[in-house]
Amino acid sequence: MHFGQLTGTIFCMRTSSFLGGILVFSKNIVPQRVGVLNFHLSLQSDRRDNMEKIKFKPILLVIVFVLLMALIPSVGFAGKDVISENIQRIKDLLGIGDHYELIHQYENFDHYGEKTISLNWHGNDERVGVEIDEEGNVKSYWKDKVSYDKGPVIYKFPTITREEGEKIAKDFINKLYPDIMDKIKYTDDNLHFTYRLLGLAGYSYHFIREENGIEFAENNVYISVDTQTGEVSSFYINWDEEVEFPDLEGIISKAEAKEIYRDNIDLELFYKLKDEDNEAYLGYNILNTDKTVDAKSKEMVSTSYRPIFTVYNTALYEGMENIAFEEEDRLVNSNKIISREEVNERLVTTFNLGENYELERHELQGNREKDIYIWEVLVMKYVGNSGSGISARVNAKTGEILDYSDPGFGPEGVGVAEYNKEELLNIAKETIKNISPEKYKEVEYVEYEGGNSVYVNRNISEFLFARKMNGIRVENEGFYILLDNVTGNVLSYHHSWSDIEFISPDNIIGEDKAKEVLLEGRDLNLEYQRKRDGEEEKDIRLVYNFKDKHLIVDAKKAELVDNRWGLIENEVIKEYKDIEESFAKEQIEKMQKHIILFEGEEFKPKEEISQKEFFQLLIQTKDMYSIYEDTTYLYERLISDGILKEEEKDMDGKVTREEAIKYIIRAFGLEPLYDLGDIYKLEFEDAHEISTNLRGHVAKARGLGIISGARYFRPKDNLTREEAAVLIYNILNRDI
C-alpha cells in the first residue's frame, strides 16, 4: 500500500505571458470534471433490428438480469457506507466542523495506479482539501484562506518560531500516522528549502524515512505550518508499506566503496557558463551521475534517474523590457528590425504551417544597451469555433528563430508512426541548417539516453544537439527538438547560444587528477534506494552514494566548484561586517532570517538604494516564493500589480523617501483615488515639501506605522539602504 507521492515542488519561474501554457482551445468551452470514474454497463447487439425478433418472458428477464449483475465484478471505490464513515472520521480527525460544506467528491488514481478519493470543503472564509486511499488514510491535506478583501496580501513576521512549528508538524504527523514516528527523520538540507531558511507565510518541513538507521529518502513527508496561526497548511506523504529492506550484513566499507567509484566513474570536460561574468570556465563533471555503489555486490548500479541535459539560455533575455508601439514602428521603418508580418511569414514557411495561420498576438522585447531585440509572437489557426496556437521567439534583427512551440500535441497513442528514428533525425538536422546554418557547424548530435519520460508512451521523438567549442561541449547550449513520429512535423524547437568568451583548453589537469580532487575529502553515505535497472521496483538496495554530486572540478585551478543552478550566496544567513554603527542594525539582523537582503559581506547602510534594489526587498513582503533575480519579470510583476507605472521605471535610478512611501502604499492597495493633499494633516515640519499628490500616501503610511513621528520627513532626499531596511521591517512588524 502506498501513502501518496509528492509529485512536484512549486517554484515561481518566469514564462512569457503567452509562451507558456497550452494554446489549444475551443471558443465554445464545455466544463468537464477530470478524474471522476463513471461506470456504465450497456448491453447491445451488433444489429439492433434483430432484437425485436427475440422474445423473453418477464420472469426470465429478471432472472437473467440478476445473474448478470452477480457475475459483474465490483469496480467501485468502496461501499457508500464505508466512504461516509471514512469521511466523517477524517472530519473528526482534522477538525473539519459541520459549518464546512462538502462541495467536491470524486474518485481518482494516484501515481502508483491505486484508487483514491478527493474531498474539498468550503467553510466561511476557508477551504480544505483532503485525499484519502481505500483504507481511509490521509495521503494529502491542504487548508487555505478565502479572502473576500480585495486588498493584496502583505506578509508579517511570524508569531511562532520555527522550532514551535516543527513540534506542530510532528504532532500532526503523529495524529495521522503514529506508527511511523520512530521511522522518520527531519532534514533541513534539502535544496528546495534553502531559498527560505525561515520564511514568512509558512515554515516548510521535510521528513525522510529511516530503516535500520539508514535513510530511504524516496519515502518522505512534506508538511508546512502557517507562521501566523500555527495551523498545518499542507501535508503530503509518500510511504510504501510493501517493501523489504536488506540488513547490514556483509556490506563493504566506505573506503572500499570510494575506490570502486574511483575506478568506475567517468568524468566529462565541458565549458561551464558563469552567470556573473561574460565568460566560461572549463570543468570536469561526473558523467554517470545515476550510478551508485551496491554495498553488498560491490557493483556500480543505477538506482536513480539520470538528469536530462537541458538547453536553456536565460542570459539572452536578461535586462529585456517591453518596447512601446511607437518605438517598435520606428525600429521597423528604419530597417533595424524585421516586422511582425515578416516573423509570421518566416514561421509559416519554416515549419510548413499552411496559409491558415495568422498572427494573433505579438510583443517586442528589447535590451537597448546590448542592442538585442526579440519578437515574442502567437500565431493561430481557426477551424470553426476552435483554434490552435503556436508560440515563438524570433531574433528581431536577424530573423533567426530562437524558440518554437506547438503545445497542442495530439492525444497519446493516436496514429501509427510513419517515420523512423533516422528519418526524424535528418528532419531535425535540416531544420537547424535552415534556421541557423552557421551554428549547425558547431554542434554535435547527442544520443539522448533515457530522454524525457513525458514522451515515452507518445508518438514523439526528441533530439539534442550540443554546442561544442574547441571540441568541448558547452553546458546547456545547443538545440533541442521534438518531432511528431506520425507526421514528421516539428512540435518544439529550442535554441540556446551565448555570446561569451571561451578560455583555451591548454594547461588543464587530466581526468585522473580531476578524480583525485573530486573524491578527496568527500564522504559517502550509506542509504537505501529502490532498484531501477529493470528489476522489480519494490526491491530495495543498500548503496553508497554522494550527496553532493553537483560539485565539479575547475580544470584550470584544480579545485571544487558548486555547480548548483539557482543557488546564490545571499540565500544563506550571514553576518554583515559594516552594520555595527547603523541605526538599523537590529532590523537588518531580524530581516535576514526571513527575507533575502543584499549580496556580499557588506550591507553598505549609508549607500543610496537603487530602485531595483528597493523593489527586490519590497516584493518579498508580497511574494515569498521568488527571488526575482530576473529583473524583467520583477518589473512585469510590479507593473501588473499596480505598484509601479511604466513611465516610472528606472532600475538603476535612486528612490526618494516620498517615492518609497508611494510604492509601499500601492503594494498595500491603499493608493488614494484622488489628489486630496490639502485635507491631510501632517505634523512634519517639512510637510510642505511633500508633493501634493503624495501627501495622502505619507499620511496613510504614518497611520499604518510604516513611518514614525520624527520631526522631519525629508521627502526629496534619496532613500538609503538602512532607511529602506527600516521601512521593510516596519511593514513586516506592523500590528494592524
Image: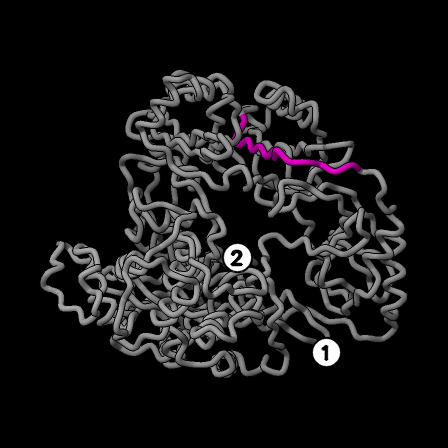
The type of residue carrying mark 2 is Gly
Q: In this view, does 99 lie above or below 192?
A: below
On-image quarter of the C terminus: bottom left
Left or right, residue 172 beside residue 642: right
Left or right, residue 634 beside residue 462: left
How many C-alpha atoms fall within 10 Å of the one at disc 2: few (<14), some, or many (≥20)?
few
Left or right, residue 698 beside residue 225: left
- Residue 213 disc label: 1
Residue 461 seen in render: no
How many C-alpha atoms fall within 10 Å of the one at disc 1: few (<14), some, or many (≥20)?
few
Where are the magenta residues, as a range? 490-504
Q: Main secondary structure of the magenta part?
A: strand
Q: What element carries label 2?
A: loop
Q: What element carries label 1?
A: loop
- Toward the viewer: 379 or 267? 267
Which residue is depicted at the point 71% across and 63% down?
A: 547
The type of residue carrying mark 1 is Gly
Is residue 87 covered in magenta?
no
Which residue is depicted at the point 27% across and 74% down?
A: 710
Residue position marked by numbered label 2 in the rendering:
8
Which residue is depicted at the point 72% across and 44% down?
A: 281
